[in-house]
Image: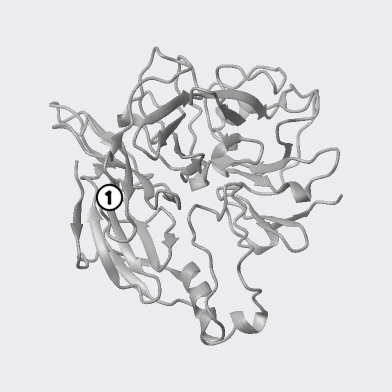
């Protein structure tokens, strides 16, 4: 389906408040603007959220009268995807599959486009009116949910959209789009319909009806990777990672559950990670968890796990390492996903000679795991059954990705119930 590009603003349904952008732009009142593009979720592919190009903010600057919201621009649909900044344009995507190019300084709409009709979150799903579908997780529409990614080589912004299909909405499609941030026009060869069967489970095809694409997109070596998970745990959903290269060719499809449903990849919108060692990392939710075993031998089912994939010579994906808590089955039984909070790779400068590659994750049950990223020390990672006792749970549950404060080597996590006394501040010591 081709997009429709308009040069004037559309009618307002909701507003997106670009407060994060204003905190940067307003600093230009005292100095020449100096800021890199915001091309991906959480700043970088380690998902640290640490903008090292940001000028140091002082308490006086933050409390000044000219620090705050710069503008509010009405858009059509809810905004779950973080805006992407390319030069002087802010690209904003919504759940009604509307995409906008805004002037970064004024918020004026330079262009807008519609990339197909969104899929309704509830309604009749067959000729019998008693057959209904209802999911309040994203309502009333599901369209563009994940944060897009900008490729400076091709010059395009890549995003995914769920587009309605079928008389009873039973045949939607997931598409990867490539959008010119200056005009909103689609790149030749796009959109790409995501389809097929996983390379590690050719017996069951990808079913877009039961899938949502929540994690921020990852650009790695000319391929855009998207993670998928379920919608209100309905139907035959499971976790997927799909790759589409910037020329418009689907290169890979991998699933976290073989022969069964579960192990969705959602991470509260956190992006898939790419580290300097060439791994793609992410966490998974409820499903069939791994049995006890070493991290270097991932089993076929990887629910409640942190998973490392590597890209093979033919472009396919292979699980090469994993970690799963000892009580993974209990997490699944009680719906306290490890995969709720996302994963952050910690830059190697914060590691040690013995453990140079670190990552951190936290989930619904409140535990924080500091992990040894692959290549690991011998015997690290995997799944081990505990011998008794319970792990401490310092937080009431984490539904937001971690963030790194470079100064002072501090890691900050926000719990699901935001109470100031329960903000965790962990310091890594060499």
Q: Is residue 33 left or right of residue 248?
A: right
198 over 402 or under it: above or below: above
261 over 272 or under it: above or below: above
User: Which residue is identified by label 1?
Assistant: 97
Residue 312 appears in the picture as rendered: yes
Residue situated in front as seen by the camera: 5 or 162 = 5
Residue situated in front as seen by the camera: 292 or 132 = 292
Q: Is residue 399 left or right of residue 77?
A: right
Residue 323 placement: quadrant: top right
SS for tag 1? loop
At a point 73% along the width and 28% down the height, the residue shown is 381
Residue situated in front as seen by the camera: 78 or 176 = 176
The N terminus lies in quadrant: top left
At a point 57% along the width and 52% down the height, the residue shown is 44
Residue 308 placement: quadrant: top right
Q: Is residue 47 left or right of residue 136?
A: right
Mark 1 neighbour density, 10 Å: few (under 14) some (14–19) many (20 or more): many
User: Where residue 62 sits in the image (x, y, percent)?
Assistant: 60, 79
Residue furthest out toward the front: 153
213 over 298 or under it: above or below: below
User: Where residue 83 sits in the image (x, y, percent)?
Assistant: 42, 59
Residue 167 placement: quadrant: top left
199 over 69 or under it: above or below: above
User: Where residue 20 sits in the image (x, y, percent)?
Assistant: 50, 67
Residue 369 appears in the picture as rendered: no
């Amino acid at each position: 389906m081709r997009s429709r590009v308009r040069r004037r603003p559309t009618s307002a349904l909701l507003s997106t408040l670009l407060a994060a952008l204003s905190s940067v732009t307003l600093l230009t009142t005292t100095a020449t603007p100096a800021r890199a593009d915001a091309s991906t979720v959480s700043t970088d592919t380690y998902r640290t959220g640490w903008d090292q190009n940001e000028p140091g903010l002082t308490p006086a600057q933050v409390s000044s009268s000219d620090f705050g919201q710069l503008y509010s621009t009405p858009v059509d649909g809810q905004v779950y995807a973080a805006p992407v900044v390319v030069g002087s344009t802010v690209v904003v995507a919504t759940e009604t599959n509307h995409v906008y190019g805004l002037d970064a300084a004024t918020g004026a709409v330079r262009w807008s486009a519609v990339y197909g009709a969104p899929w309704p979150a509830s309604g009749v799903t067959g000729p019998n009116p008693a057959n209904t579908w209802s999911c309040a997780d994203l309502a009333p529409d599901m369209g563009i949910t994940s944060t897009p990614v900008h490729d400076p080589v091709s010059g395009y912004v890549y995003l995914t959209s769920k587009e309605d299909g079928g008389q009873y909405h039973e045949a939607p499609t997931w598409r990867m789009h490539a959008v010119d941030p200056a005009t909103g026009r689609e790149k030749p060869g796009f959109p790409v319909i995501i389809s097929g069967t996983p390379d590690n489970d050719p017996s069951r095809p990808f079913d877009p009806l039961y899938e949502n694409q929540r994690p921020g997109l990852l650009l790695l070596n000319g391929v855009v990777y998207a993670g998928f998970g379920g919608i209100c745990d309905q139907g035959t959903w499971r976790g997927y990672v799909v790759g589409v290269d910037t020329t418009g060719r689907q290169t890979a499809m991998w699933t976290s559950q073989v022969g069964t449903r579960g192990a969705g990849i959602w991470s509260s919108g956190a992006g898939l990670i790419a580290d300097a060692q060439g791994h793609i990392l992410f966490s998974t939710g409820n499903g069939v968890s791994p049995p006890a075993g070493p991290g270097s031998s991932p089993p076929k089912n990887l629910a409640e796990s942190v998973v490392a994939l590597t890209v093979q010579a033919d472009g396919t994906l292979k699980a090469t390492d994993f970690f799963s808590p000892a009580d993974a089955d209990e997490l699944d039984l009680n719906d306290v996903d490890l995969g709720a909070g996302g994963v952050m790779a910690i830059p190697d400068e914060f590691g040690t000679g013995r453990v140079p590659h670190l990552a951190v994750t936290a989930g619904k049950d409140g535990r924080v795991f500091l992990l040894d990223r692959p290549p690991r020390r011998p015997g690290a990672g995997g799944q081990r059954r505990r011998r008794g006792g319970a792990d401490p749970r310092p937080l009431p549950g984490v539904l937001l990705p971690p963030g790194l404060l470079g100064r002072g080597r501090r890691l900050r996590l926000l719990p699901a119930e935001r109470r100031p006394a329960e903000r965790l501040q962990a310091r890594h010591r060499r």
